[in-house]
Image (cartoon, rainbow, N blue to C red):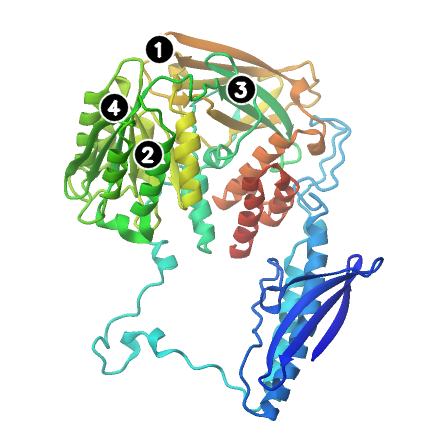
Amino acid sequence: MAERWWGSVGGGALVAECVWPNVSTGDARCQKRVVSKTDGTTGTSGDASLAMSNHQKRRTPVINQTLTNNRVKNRSVRRARLLAGLLVAALVASACSASDDESGSSGGLFEERTESTRYPSSSRTSESSDADEGFVTDSASGDAAEAMDEEAMSDAMADDEEFTAPPTSPASTNPAAVEGGFFANEPPPEPETQSRQDSNTFKDYGVRSFIDTDRDPLSTFALDVDSASYFIGRQFLLDGVLPPSASVRVEEYVNAFDYDYPSPKNGLTVVADAGPSPFNPDNVIVRLGVQAQEITNRERADANLTFVVDTSGSMDRDDRLGLVKIALKALVEELDRNDTVAIVTYSNAGDIILPPTSVGEYEVIIEAIDRLHPGGSTNLEAGLEVGYSLANEAFQRGATNRVILASDGVANVGLTDPDGLAAQIRGDADSGIQLVTIGVGMGNFNDVVMETLANDGDGFYAYVNDKAQARKLFTEDLLSNLVTVAVDGKIQVEFDSDNVVSYRLLGFENRAVLDSDFRNDSVDAGELGAGHQVTALYELELARGVRSSDRLGTVALRWEDPDTRDVRETRLELAGGILQDSWTQTGEDFRLAVTVAAYAEILRQSQYAQDLTLARVAKEANALAGQSDMVAELVDLIREADRRS
């Protein structure tokens, strides 16, 4: 026996069909089909339990029960009919919602803005782009369908006088709730997602303000290629909560994405482009893109890698150590036979698990990785001490010498102060042994320790929270960036006070360098590996009447060659001609960087993003979703943040 319910969507008819293959048992299965209006073809696309779209996220009951009498059978038939009707309604609502999303960036950061000039003059429109009337979101249709679902299901339950909820399984009962039981006074276990939000350590570096160029035309900062902050925020949102504002570093959100910058033959190069600002319609955004030369795996020198792996008890949570082991094995498979790997673990003390060993002895290395097990306290100081000792033993001049720390950042035995730990490795960094820190896990996670060590260890800081990301970081990002091409990289921008009234740098709050130290080569700055990129965004308030030929400023990029120790400097002149008249005239890379920055500014509650909404940012990101899977996921993350706001 089969019954069908019809609706319409797009170019075809939508069918919800329920089939009772066995009337005696009442077993039922519901499917949706789309029937073309033109050729009559049909297609089946899933059972009722999976039919709802991701936008709606409906929880529909699965009709598959053994019935014992005709009265119960009839009630099941009524429920199945109701379910199919709800299915059609929800799918139509979902299709309408999807058509809204496909409209590009309508309702985005610059909805229907018109400008006669690119500069803030008397003819430039000052109409705010922040009006919410034009925004189209997914929530309206979803809420309507959900309300209808709940009302109809409530009616169905009222119709069925004998309907009762399924009993709770005794196995799921909390022992603490059993009166007079063994552990009657014990509190219920804490949900894992909640425990991941507790006892994490972040530092709030504040938000840079606008600076008048008449007072200070120079802006100087160290290059930074860290991306950990973005992926930490991703982990929080995957757990269903907003990331703490202190965890959000704008530059790391922006630099988590790849951009199409020209690659130099040697060292570094810098390019610039500019367009309207989403934060203030009278301002502009200037994007600076620094690109390091690319070196293939075949061209690179031999690598001596010393892994310092946290095996304390906290690494047993969420299988953090298991994630590290998977990533280590994937990396070893990609290394060359002439590379060496050493492994040090630390819990109560630092222990050598594997002395420097040629990758040619693959089985020996894999066996050592398999022996890693969590347990004990966390003596990070001892782990670093033993790790750097091994790295010095394996050190080769002209080779890549790296210590790679994989940890949740916790230190509770020995020296625990981040600055004190960083001071111990500063000398090794100066001698050519760089430190890369890989953060894993969330809950009792110390972001400050991991970032401070990476900065002072002349390396970079990344974060992983799933197997796919761990494999990518260790086999693609880490491997391609093994060769350092620039040491102590710094940028200094001198703005022209005649044409730039004020400016602010988005992010880099903890990478500031004194203007007077720009050419002081003894001051520590940032290191870039082969293929690394750094993107920096400035928001500018321009003087009225600025023309395309007018000078905006000069960008100076300075770094040290790690092989020759020669200091190099390159300059780029900024003129009004780099500014585009409208948002749509800017390139996709520019729009992506600014959109990500707007997302980060809202998350960290910047005063400059008060007139922006995550819904508008999501619209803009959705228009760029075709660039990559990571950008497509960004849209989902922004929408999740909007729901949690």
The label number, if any, that marks residue 437 in the structure image: 2
Considering only order in the chain, which callout, 3 or 2, is on the residue closer to the N terminus? 3
Q: CA distance from mark 4 to mark 3?
A: 38 Å
Residue at mark 2 to residue at mark 3: CA–CA distance: 40 Å
Q: Which residue occupies 40% across, 45% down?
A: 465
Q: Give SS at disc 4.
A: helix
Residue 163 in picture, x, y percent from top left: 54, 87
Q: Amino acid at mark 4?
A: Arg
Which secondary structure, mark 2? strand
Earlier along the polypeptide chain: callout 3 or callout 1? Answer: 3
State yes or no: discs 2 and 1 in contact (Cβ < 8 Å). Answer: no
For disc 4, the neighbor class at 10 Å (few under 14, some 14 to 19, many from 20) is some
Q: Are marks 4 and 3 in contact (CB under 8 Å)?
A: no
**In this rendering, position of residue 114 left or right of residue 632:** right
For label 1, the SS is: loop
Q: At label 2, which amino acid type do we have? A: Thr
Displayed quadrant of residue 484: top left
Comes first in the chain, label 4 or label 3: 3
Residue marked by disc 1: 563
Mark identifier at residue 214: 3
Q: Is residue 121 visible?
A: yes
